[in-house]
Amino acid sequence: MVDQQARVAAIIQAVAQTSRPVGTTESLFDTGVLDSFALPELVAALEQAFAIKIPDSDLNADTFESVDKITAYIQARS
């Protein structure tokens, strides 16, 4: 799981174009790391990196709120 968290954090950093470390429990939206415009790009990057399909019905800020929540979501979809 730690490896997946590191991969998710790296993807978030790439999408957000930041080298700032991303905590596993911090709110990506409340801290300004991501905004709603970055969500589609993040989803596309996650789909490609983890070979999953994320349906439109799952596109909400709560699912993608933190590294931990994203990692849990990916594990549930794999």
Image (cartoon, rainbow, N blue to C red):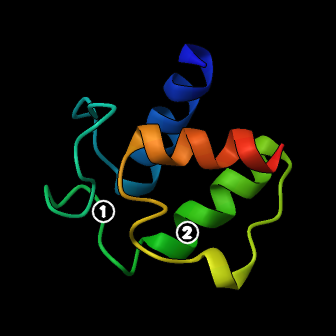
- As measured in the structure, the alpha-carbon distance from the residue carrying label 2 to the one carrying label 1 is 10 Å
Instruction: Judge left or right: residue 42 versus residue 56.
Output: left
Tell me the residue that label 2 is attached to.
Answer: 41
* Position in image of residue 28 (x %, y %): 27, 54
- Give the residue at x 24% y 55%: 33
Q: Amino acid at mark 2?
A: Glu
Toward the viewer: 37 or 2? Answer: 2
Instruction: Judge left or right: residue 23 versus residue 58.
Output: left
Q: Residues within 10 Å of mark 1 (few under 14, many from 20)?
A: many
Instruction: Judge left or right: residue 7 versus residue 22.
Output: right
* Position in image of residue 60 (x %, y %): 48, 77
Q: Quadrant of residue 32?
A: bottom left
Tell me the residue that label 1 is attached to.
Answer: 34
Q: Amino acid at mark 1?
A: Leu
Toward the viewer: 60 or 7? Answer: 60
Instruction: Looking at this view, name the residue that lies furthest to the left.
Output: 31
- Give the residue at x 29% y 72%: 35
